[in-house]
Image: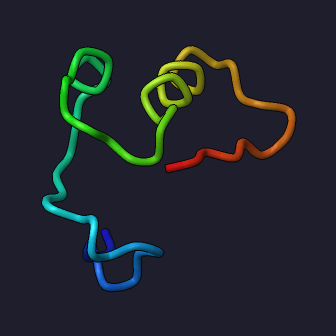
Amino acid sequence: MAEVAPARATQPDNIREHRWWTRAELAVTQETVYPVGLADLVAAVAEGRTPERPSVLTG
């Protein structure tokens, strides 16, 4: 697995922490998670509902 490189992010100054999340954790967290909409996309893909077109997730 590749190392996480916050410096390669588009807005590295906003990164406070990085870690792995379970689907359940993403669904209920009160923390700010970027990109916005990530939890819904992960859940859909895990359920076999892959988007027909690339999804644009915004911050």
Hey, which quadrant is residue 18 in on the image? bottom left
Q: Residue furthest bottom?
A: 7
Residue 55: % across, % down: 72, 42
Where residue 17 appears, x then y in whole percent? Answer: 13, 59
User: Which residue of the protein is positioned furthest toward the right in this rendering?
Assistant: 52
In the visual, does 2 lie left or right of 15? right
Q: Residue at x 49, y 30 (%)?
A: 42
Q: Is residue 7 above or below residue 27?
A: below
Q: How is the image coloured?
A: rainbow
**Left or right of 31 in this view: 39:** right
Which residue is painted at 31% across and 85% down in the image? Answer: 7
Query: Is 48 on the left-hand or right-hand side of 42?
Result: right
Position in image of residue 23 (x %, y %): 31, 23
Image quarter in which the N terminus is found:
bottom left
Horizontal arrangement in the rendering, residue 37 relative to residue 32 (left or right): right
Picture residue at 29% right of the left edge, 26% below the top:
26
* Residue 54, x across and y down, in percent: 78, 46
Who's the residue at 76% across and 31% down the image?
A: 51
Marks counted in the figure total 0
